[in-house]
Structure formats: structure tokens, C-alpha cells
Image (cartoon, grey):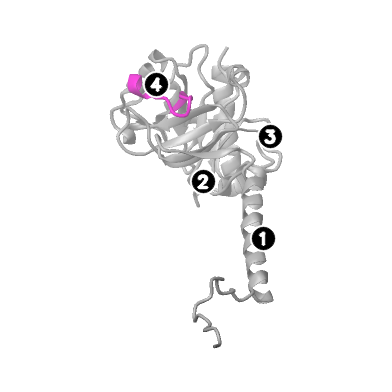
């Protein structure tokens, strides 16, 4: 009598082999992911990392971080701001709006100026420059409000709005007038704050030797500024900190503590 063969086999069914096209797709995906990781790491020379405490990424290549404020940030709790820690860091400097144009004074400047010093921050004062107004009375406005002391950061000329009232050459000459008046009076070379567009149009090649503070939120590096002497980088306008309600501008100093001290008023 013939033996009956079971309809079920003890061996698992063999899976069909992956066709060459499938292997090619897998290889392409792996290469794409690997290439993407390599490219991001290549761009991330400044060691950008997201910090949940403040809601933004920071360039951890640099250790000295700070903010800039004006009346628009409301009443500031400076001790709380100073005490905040994030990733073993804390804020170390603050630029504070002092004046604008020929007559305006930031209503919170005096209090912010005093409190920033009281909590031990490096502090700097800035003037919001109006390019269709004469530079001399604009400096006089700043001079009336800002008394720099030993250890303060240099005065800042905030140049970020344009005008059709003067030619490019006249705008440049007026900026030089303000900067010269400030340097003569305070005995320290002022900082120029500007953005990428105004840097290319007005600042580049015309203000050699002036420390720059660049507002640039667009990239991982500042390579496109060639050999510019950039000391401060405003890289975000949407960070948070204890002591301030709402977002605040974040900046980083592109140097060491000794470099920062060397810039200050002697």
C-alpha cells in the first residue's frame, strides 16, 4: 500500500528573490540618506543644536551668547534673565536701544541700562539710524542719553533702513560722520549693525576696520561675507528667555572672552 504524502510541508515556503531593480532602489535610498547626513554635517561647522529651553537652535561652536532689547520687549526681569541656564550656558551680553533719529529716546533705556549692569552683563547701547536725517544731530541725541563706562561695549550704529533722499555716496559719508563723532567722543571704535543687503550695498569696502554686527537668519555660516570683520551675529529673532514675555533677538559673539573684553571701553 502506498504511503500517503501530507499536504503540509515542514519547511517554510521560499520567498521570491528580490529583483535587481529592488536592490538598486535600496542602494539609492541608502546613498541618499548617507549623502544627506554628510552634507548636513559639512554645513554644520558651527555645531548648531536646538535648545528647547529657548525654542531655537544655537551655534555651540561659540560660548558667548546674548540678546538685544528695546521698549518693544516690555518690562524686563533682569535677575531672572541672568539666572537662566540653557545647556550649561547663560546669557552674557545685552545690546539695548538708546535712541532713534534726532530726538527719540527709548523710554525703557535708562532702566534697562542700569539693570543690565547690575546683574553683571556686558552691556552695549545702540542708536537706530534714520538715513534721511542729518548725522550730527542724531549723534547729539545719542550722546545726551548714553554715558559709557569702563567695561561697556562700544556704541552701536544700527543701520537697517534705506532712503531715496540721498545718493548712495551721500549715505555712506553721513554714516562715516556719525561713526567719527562717536569714536572721537567715546574713545573707542563703534560697531556697525546691519543686514546682508545693506552690507553689500553700503558697508563692504567702505568701512574697513569697523567691527560688524550682522543680522542674518538665512544660513548655517557667514561665509558669504568674505573677509568682513564680524564680531556679532544676530542669528534669530524668535528666541525666548526667562524675564521677557514674548520672543527676543538672539546673538552670538564670534570670539573668546578675552576678545570681548578687548573691545570694551577702557
> Residue beneath label 2, please?
217
Q: Nearer the viewer, residue 166 or 108?
A: 108
Marks 3 and 1, Cα distance to the nearest angstrom? 45 Å
Earlier in the chain: of badge 1 and badge 4, it is 1
Q: Secondary structure at mark 2?
A: loop
Q: Residues within 10 Å of mark 1 (few under 14, many from 20)?
A: few
Q: Residue at x 49, y 81 (%)?
A: 7
Earlier in the chain: of badge 4 and badge 3, it is 4
Q: Which mark is residue 82?
A: 4
Determine whether 146 is above or below 200 in the image. Answer: above
Determine whether 152 is above or below 161 in the image. Answer: above
Q: Which mark is residue 31?
A: 1
Q: Give the residues drawn in magenta, as a range.
A: 78-95
Q: Residue at x 55, y 40 (%)?
A: 48
Determine whether 181 is above or below 248 in the image. Answer: above
Earlier in the chain: of badge 3 and badge 1, it is 1
Marks 1 and 2, Cα distance to the nearest angstrom? 30 Å
Foreground mark, 2 or 4?
4
Marks 4 and 3, Cα distance to the nearest angstrom? 34 Å
Q: What is the number of callouts on the image? A: 4
Amino acid at each position: 500500500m502506498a504511503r500517503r504524502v501530507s499536504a503540509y510541508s515542514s519547511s517554510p515556503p521560499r520567498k521570491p528573490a528580490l529583483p535587481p531593480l529592488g536592490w538598486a532602489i535600496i542602494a539609492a535610498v541608502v546613498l541618499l540618506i548617507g549623502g544627506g547626513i554628510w552634507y548636513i554635517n559639512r554645513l554644520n561647522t558651527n555645531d548648531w543644536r536646538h535648545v528647547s529651553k529657548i525654542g531655537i537652535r544655537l551655534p555651540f561652536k561659540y560660548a558667548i551668547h546674548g540678546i538685544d532689547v528695546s521698549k518693544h520687549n516690555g518690562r524686563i526681569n533682569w535677575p531672572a534673565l541672568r539666572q537662566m541656564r540653557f545647556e550649561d550656558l547663560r546669557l552674557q551680553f545685552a545690546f539695548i536701544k538708546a535712541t532713534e533719529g534726532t530726538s527719540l529716546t527709548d523710554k525703557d533705556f535708562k532702566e534697562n541700562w542700569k539693570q543690565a549692569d547690575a546683574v553683571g552683563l556686558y552691556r552695549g547701547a545702540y542708536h537706530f539710524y534714520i538715513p534721511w536725517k542729518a548725522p550730527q544731530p542724531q549723534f547729539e541725541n545719542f550722546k545726551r542719553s548714553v554715558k559709557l563706562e569702563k567695561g561697556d561695549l562700544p556704541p552701536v550704529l544700527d543701520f537697517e533702513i534705506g532712503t531715496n533722499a540721498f545718493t548712495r555716496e551721500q549715505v555712506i559719508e553721513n554714516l562715516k560722520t556719525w561713526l567719527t563723532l562717536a569714536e572721537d567722543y567715546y574713545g573707542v571704535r563703534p560697531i556697525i549693525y546691519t543686514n546682508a543687503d545693506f552690507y553689500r550695498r553700503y558697508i563692504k569696502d567702505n568701512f574697513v576696520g569697523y567691527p560688524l554686527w550682522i543680522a542674518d537668519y538665512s544660513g548655517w555660516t557667514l561665509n558669504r561675507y568674505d573677509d568682513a570683520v564680524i564680531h556679532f551675529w544676530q542669528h534669530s529673532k524668535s528666541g525666548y528667555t526667562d524675564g521677557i514675555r514674548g520672543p527676543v533677538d538672539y546673538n552670538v559673539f564670534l570670539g573668546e572672552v578675552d576678545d570681548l573684553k578687548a573691545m570694551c571701553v577702557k
